[in-house]
Image (tube, coloured by chain):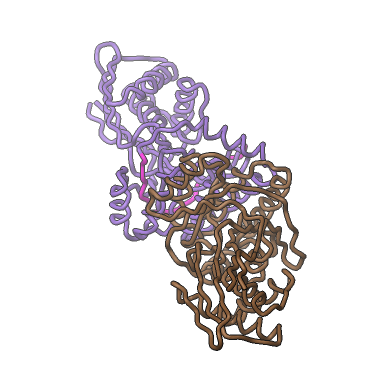
Chain colours: A purple, B brown
């Protein structure tokens, strides 16, 4: 019997612009998916409150069996602190934690790089398309500076965050398409916005490396995402509620159109969380998680 | 006894960016200040619900007396459809309508250019500083394309607007200072936003001249104003309520920090106005006014 976990993620800066070659800053957050797995004589039994998780677990198990060249019967139970389809990387965390659990049970020691690679493969095969970012961040933890066609760069940064979840599921695909349409209609206006988000992301990277405040940059980035048309009334409500309650900065995170926002809260984290809850939404006190996927407990 | 009127104004595009050399589009709206003036044997009696108006009326009367080289006793009554300190150019309309009324009563025919010039002088002397834009637009009506250090350009455009007034008075001076501080702190990020607002304004001018929709440009401009930090929760609430009720586009207008927003409503004007009122705010159904200052009634 083994228990593993892997963290969720938020995009700190650069969503949407990353589609057009700009960098993004992504970090693991201290909210996790836990996998409890036991060897059994045969079969695969999966217990989860969320139907979405099954396909990722099943695919992750298959990929580990294939990679290890051996298999076994498994009972797997999923406990998640992450709401699904919220942009917090729930499916990546499920995939990664499952891969870690099953490989440990089989005695097939995988490197972190191998776990991340199999995790990405699981997402790819289930979804048809997937960025390798979510599974990489869930595996390695910490903060990654991502530039298209370049290697990830790890940033050493701590940032106290509160995540506000609107409860509204959204389609990343549709939101990315909407931005593309706007960009095609008004290229001379939308391209500078995208490049400016890239500048904000690079500036935020330097400031995080120097342990400087990035709150105002979050606020500006949020406004530019509004200009791209991906914010919603509810996201704005949470962003303003967080700022009013003492957050240093706040922005939507991920695709927009629902999903989540983040607030930077060196102080007043509790007050900000309560302000988000007072809007009828879910608040996760979720600082950056330096640790990625890990074994929580392994009883033989 | 004479009755004159002069319209208020809204900034359609370009607020804040105009401070840094970018163009702005400003239009007169069909909400007016009415001045009822009568010659009396002596003195100056001013009746108005709003204490702010007195100084403008007094100064306007003085300037006309000086310009005409003659004077008379006056009873002046002000009726206004414009909330004061809302960014709708109430003080400019008061000044302009008073100048027109008093000059007519004295038989001193002033050209529109002379009225606009005296109106600007009245605002300057009362406030210490004033842009000539508000008094020009109130005098001439219609839509003006304004470029710093260049002549106004008149645009022939019709645009059905609903104005939403938050009821929150704000200080233009402080908001302009806040943008300047942000610009000085992050010039490489804020300067492109200001230039982009300029591009939107020029694009909107061309589209208005061709009778094309400018709703999406309003939405983008609003997002960029959010990025500059001048929007508020209430302004955003009104902007989203208007869009939801069928507006083609919506944005804050003027300095932000309170004041007003505008919604472009080729259809659904009533529905949009009611949505704004449902947020506890005042809605003005205020299409562009092609006419500027005018004599409403002149009984000898």
Q: Is residue B205 above or below residue A258?
A: below
* B203 relative to B253 in the view: left or right: right
**Residue A153 appears in the figure:** no
Residue that lies at the very extreme toward the top in this rendered image: A42
Q: Residue at x 61, y 64 (%)?
A: B296
Give the residue at the far front of this rendering: B300
Vertical side of B161 occupied by B244: above or below: above
Q: Quadrant of the C terminus of chain B?
A: bottom right
State the residue in front, A130 or B252.
B252
The image quadrant where one finds the N terminus of chain B is: bottom right
> What percent of the width, then of the height, locates residue A90?
38, 33
Relative side of A103 to B224, left or right? left
Q: Which residues are magenta?
A: A149-166
Q: Residue furthest left?
A: A299
Q: Report the front residue among A291 and B196.
A: B196
Residue A42: x %, y % from top left: 27, 11
| Residue A260 magenta | no
Q: Residue at image x 56%, y 49%?
A: B161
The quadrant where residue B6 appears: bottom right
Q: Quadrant of residue B173?
A: bottom right
Of B155 and A47, nearer the camera is B155
Q: Is residue A18 left or right of residue A292?
A: right
Residue A194 appears at what percent x and percent y?
Answer: 61, 45
Residue A165 forms part of the magenta stretch: yes
Q: How many marks?
A: 0
Q: Quadrant of residue B41?
A: bottom right
- Residue at position x 67%, y 71% from top? B132
- Image-based side of B150 in relation to B182, left or right: right
The spot of residue A37 in percent (x, y) is: 27, 24
> Does the image show residue B150?
yes
Q: Looking at the image, which residue is at 43% across and 53% down?
A: A250
| Of the pair A261 and B124, the residue shown nearer to us | B124
């Amino acid at each position: 019997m083994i228990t593993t976990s892997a963290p969720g993620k938020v995009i700190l800066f650069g969503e949407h612009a990353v589609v057009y070659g700009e960098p993004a800053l992504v970090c693991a957050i201290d909210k996790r998916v836990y996998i409890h797995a036991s060897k059994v004589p045969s079969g695969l039994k999966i217990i989860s409150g969320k139907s979405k998780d099954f396909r990722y677990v099943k695919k992750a198990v298959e990929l580990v069996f294939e990679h290890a060249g051996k298999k076994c019967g498994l009972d797997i139970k999923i406990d998640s602190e992450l709401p699904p389809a919220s942009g917090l990387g729930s499916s990546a965390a499920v995939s990664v934690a499952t891969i870690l659990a099953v490989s440990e049970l089989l005695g097939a020691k995988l490197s972190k790089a191998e776990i991340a690679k199999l995790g990405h493969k699981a997402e790819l095969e289930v979804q048809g398309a997937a960025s390798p970012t979510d599974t990489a961040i869930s595996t390695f933890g910490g903060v990654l500076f991502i530039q298209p066609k370049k290697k990830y760069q790890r940033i050493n940064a701590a940032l106290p965050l509160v995540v506000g979840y609107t409860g509204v599921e959204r389609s990343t695909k549709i939101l990315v398409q909407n931005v593309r349409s706007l960009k095609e209609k008004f290229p001379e206006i939308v391209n500078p916005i995208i490049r400016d988000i890239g500048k904000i992301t690079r500036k935020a990277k330097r400031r995080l490396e120097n342990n400087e405040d990035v709150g105002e940059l979050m606020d500006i980035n949020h406004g530019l995402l509004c200009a791209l048309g991906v914010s919603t009334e509810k996201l704005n409500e949470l962003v303003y509620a967080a700022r009013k309650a003492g957050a240093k900065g706040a922005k939507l995170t991920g695709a927009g159109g629902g999903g989540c926002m983040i607030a930077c809260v060196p102080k007043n984290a509790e007050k900000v969380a309560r302000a988000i809850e007072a809007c009828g939404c879910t608040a996760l006190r979720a600082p950056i998680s330096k640790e990625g996927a890990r074994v929580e407990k392994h009883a033989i």
